[in-house]
Image: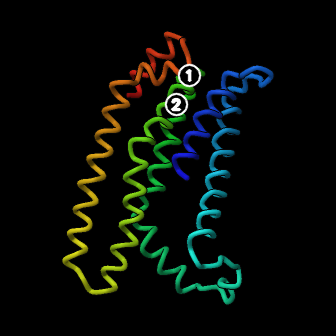
Amino acid sequence: PSVVMNLINIAGNCILIHGLGPIPSLGVLGVTISTNTSKVLGLLLILYFFRKFIDIRLSFKYLRPFPKSTLYKILYLGLPSGESLSYQISQMVIMRFVNVMGIVVITTKIYAYIIAMFSYIYSQALAMATQIIVGFLIGAGDLDAVEKRVWKTIRIAVTISTTVTLLLFFNSDSIYGIFTDNQEWQLKNRTFN
């Protein structure tokens, strides 16, 4: 679902930012439409796969009575790390500076962000899968297998991310050239690589 979501996002950005045929050029509004549409479609795909391959039914009845103690435990573990929150705040601060620089820089930054996602999307998928396996192994009391599994995942994730990052870096002119032939735009992409 993540790969499909990103491909839809990139294609949507390309069409809606610059316009295509009867579709007008929408600029930043086009980015918003494309991003939100791709995220909704990604969510629908996840729900589809969840229902098709996992024999568990989602229902609001599991929230009655509301599991306050479970929510507290999740927040107790999740809030202190704040990694996702700090990342999103940093992106807002960066966008504040980028917005001052004009539409070419804004567009370049957005494309750079979307293309960069391909570098770490595989690591995220491996990390999520490993969380499930590690939980199972800890439940079974096999702590030696946990360490081996984690280090194996790290090696695979770093290898894949490094390879994809290098491929994107050395082919950045060609990749950015898909979206425009504007030399100013292509020059600015080097700033974000």
Q: Secondary structure at mark 1?
A: loop
Residue 44 appears at what percent x and percent y?
66, 58
Q: Determine the secondary structure under disc 2.
A: helix
- Residue at 57% x, 46% y is 4
Say which residue appears at 63% left-offset and 50% top-offset.
39
Label 2 – label 1 distance at C-alpha: 9 Å
Q: Are marks 2 and 1 in contact (CB under 8 Å)?
A: yes
Residue tagged 1:
179
Q: Residues within 10 Å of mark 1 (few under 14, many from 20)?
A: some
Q: Position of residue 86 (x, y in %)?
A: 44, 53
Question: Which quarter of the image is occupied by the C terminus?
Answer: top left
Q: Position of residue 79 (x, y in %)?
A: 46, 67
Identify the residue under disc 2: 111
* Residue placed furthest toward the bottom: 65
- Measured as percent of width and height from the top left, residue 80 is found at 41, 67
Find residue 105 and name its label.
none
Residue at position x 58%, y 78% in the image: 55
Residue 164 figure quarter: top left
Amino acid type at mark 1 = Phe
- Residue 87 position (above or below residue 26): below
The three-letter code of the residue at mark 2 reads Tyr
Q: Residue lying at the far right in this picture: please name it.
A: 22
The quarter of the picture where residue 181 lies is top right
Q: Residues within 10 Å of mark 2 (few under 14, many from 20)?
A: many
Instruction: Name the one closer to the observer, 147 or 89.
Output: 147
